Amino acid sequence: MQVLVINSGSSSIKYQLLEPDNGDVVASGVVQRIGEPVGDGSPTIEHKSDGKTFEHDGPIADHGEGLRLVFDLFAKSGHDLAAADLGAVGHRVVHGGEVFYEPTLITDDVVRAIADLSTLAPLHNPANVTGIESARALLPEVPQVAVFDTAFFHHLPDAAKTYAIDAETAAAHGIRKYGFHGTSHDYVSGRVAEVLGRDRSEINQIVLHLGNGASASAIRGGRAVDTTMGLTPLEGLVMGTRSGDLDPGIIFHLIRAAGMDVQQVDDLLNRRSGIKGLSGVNDFRELGRLIDSGDAAAKLAYEVYIHRLRRYIGAYLVELGRVDAITFTAGVGENDARVRADALAGLSRFGIDVDPDRNTAENRSARYISPEGAEVAVLVVPTNEELAIARASAALVG
């Protein structure tokens, strides 16, 4: 069986065709600038298969057209989806609310329910629905499965998921901590157990998913007990363009003193804050170059980022009591040795150390970066949300 995994954004589609049993990627690609003008010569679709890259350069009106063009590229590359052993299409859906917390077979009612949850994820769920509807139209006979980013954190303890606001208001508007990146945290924590050679139910661990979006989780015995993102992906760590935690009074101050409306505040905190708001860039490679050149703003941005990250690591050490593993994953977590070293510096008395040689070694596989025999295993584990979605989808329809 093969599974096509689709991750639809507001103006993009990322996809992979995988064999869930062995994890082999048959083909993958990205559709960009959907509904936007083009003309700079860069491709709007890049499709990779069998070591070759196939491109499309023209404008793409909507997600339906984007997927139709992708299907044409599958056929052109020798992997016609109509003739493939396609067992399911798995869709990443950002917000499941209180309704969805397991992989779910998509029906008309499920699509409507996902759309209704757009009030909780206005930037993500509408795009997810558009991708689902387009794929169902093109592959009407293939089972379609929704896998929810919030699912892994659905059963957080009440004390962790409850905000201290009027209970009736919270209940009426679905206000609680939902958490995000759950598919990644679930997958990585399972891989940690494999690397350690232990059952996941025996392990207390902290997983640090550090990409342009960033989140941390505390996991006790395979179940999440806390995470940094909340009602929305804005809470928690400093991110590429998001502020993370801040005094809620700042919002009122901006409305009253700066005359900003809700949309302007939303844009500020989600798109013009974080590392980019402090330094002007949100790529950590560029941030590192600026720091090394003596840029004071870049240095401050990095220090704020590390400060917030260490604060949550400390909180989760206390919350778990005993920690067996701390794991870095996602783009920054997997590739930035400086972040890993600084995040855990000075924690030797807690049994936490980073070996400099292991940390800086060129290695793309799951690996230890703590010294031999360290009390707490520190690891780098590449995340693979697509494989997790493929396997969840195959298990549901299998």
Image (spheres, grey):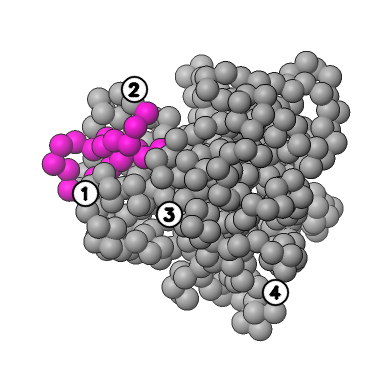
As drawn, 179 above or below 328:
below
Point out the frontmost of discs 3 and 4: 3
Q: Residue 186 carries which label?
A: 3
Q: How crowded is mark 1: few (under 14 residues within 10 Å), some or many (20 or more)?
A: few
Local crowd size for mark 2, using a 10 Å CA cut-off: few (<14), some (14–19), many (≥20): few
List the residue tagged with mark 4: 173
Work out how far the residue at label 3 is from the one at label 4, CA to CA, in angstroms: 27 Å
Quarter assignment of residue 257: bottom right
- The residue wearing badge 1 is 197
For the residue pair 98 and 81, the one nearer the viewer reads as 81
Which of pointers 1 and 3 lies earlier in the amino acid sequence? 3
Residue type indicated by callout 1: Gly
- Image coords of residue 348 (percent x, y): 21, 44
x and y, in percent, of residue 109 in the image: 72, 68
Q: Name the residue under label 2.
A: 362
Judged from this view, the residue extending furthest toward the bottom is 168
Q: Does the magenta stretch include residue 372?
A: yes
What residue is rendered at 72% in x and 62% in y? Answer: 111
* Front tag of 4 and 1: 1
How packed mark 4 is, by other alpha carbons closer than 10 Å (few <14, some 14-19, many 20 or more), is: few
